Image (cartoon, rainbow, N blue to C red):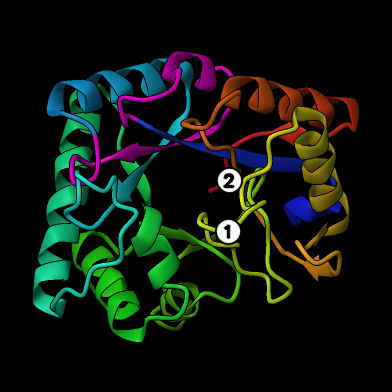
Amino acid sequence: MSPTSGSVIDLNADLGEGVGDDDAMLTVVSSANIACGFHAGTPTELLATCRAAAAAGVRIGAQVSYPDRAGFGRRFMEIGTDDLIADLIYQIGALDALARSVGTAVTYVKPHGALYNAVVHHEQQAAAVITAVAEVDRALAIMGLPGARVVDAAQSAGLPVILEAFADRAYTPAGTLVPRSQAGAVLTDSAEIAERVVGLVTDGRLTAIDGSTVSVAAESICLHGDTPGAVGHARAVRDALAAAGIAVAAGR
């Protein structure tokens, strides 16, 4: 049964980045996109985050990025296919080793920041992501936006996918994320965010930044952990879902 039928939804958050309150977010989410050191996180921080996620019963995904700690992975990079594939395999493998050392494992891969936005439409980089994931483990799922090139490529390659939507990000009428540089790109009102998520899960729709209605199929909802008031937003979403009779749980 699809999560948008109103029964169950996965909540995910970006963790291990050295910002925000990871411990609090782990009491709300069912999936943790853990940084892999290329945009944020030290090995010690990442191991501690894996341990905390395991203790909380939260599944782990590798939040892979461009090699861009200075820009927090939010700057687009032109990077050769072989280099990008190697960077991604390195990140997935490192995080999985840390996760396995505390009794869990990486089960999905989610590109971070500028790489996430690039593989919505960038054919070469999307293909590199798919190649890297397939070479590590074809059972790993790709988390991404519905209609993104990387998601379509994953499905064509026979890899599992997790379709994702964002609780606190504005959408364009085309169903993509409004760039962070644009006013109104990040929502800040907990009640509005919570209402938006319940509507998305029950109806499969949300309101775009221009007021139009966008259909969005989602199996997982991202709650950003590094924005002001993030924990309050996350708890409001979780409470609103419970009030609507919607359970929170990881999928596959």
- Find the magenta span and give its range: 16-40
Q: Position of residue 140 (x, y in %)?
A: 36, 56
Compare marks 1 and 2 and give the one earlier in the sequence.
1
Task: Name the mark nearer the viewer: 1 or 2.
Answer: 1
104 up-or-down from 115: above or below: above
Q: Position of residue 201 (x, y in %)?
A: 79, 49
Q: Is residue 228 left or right of residue 84?
A: right
Amino acid identity at mark 2: Gly
In the rendered structure, find residue 182 and report the number of the disc placed on it: 1
Residue at the location (40% across, 72% down)? 119
Check residue 35 for magenta coloring.
yes
In the depicted view, which residue is nearer to us: 127 or 160? Answer: 127
Q: CA distance from mark 1 to mark 2?
A: 33 Å
Check residue 91 for magenta coloring.
no
**SS of the residue at dot 1?**
loop
In the depicted view, which residue is nearer to us: 191 or 133? Answer: 191
Image quadrant in which the N terminus is located: bottom right
Residue 7 visible in the snapshot: no
Most common SS among magenta residues: loop
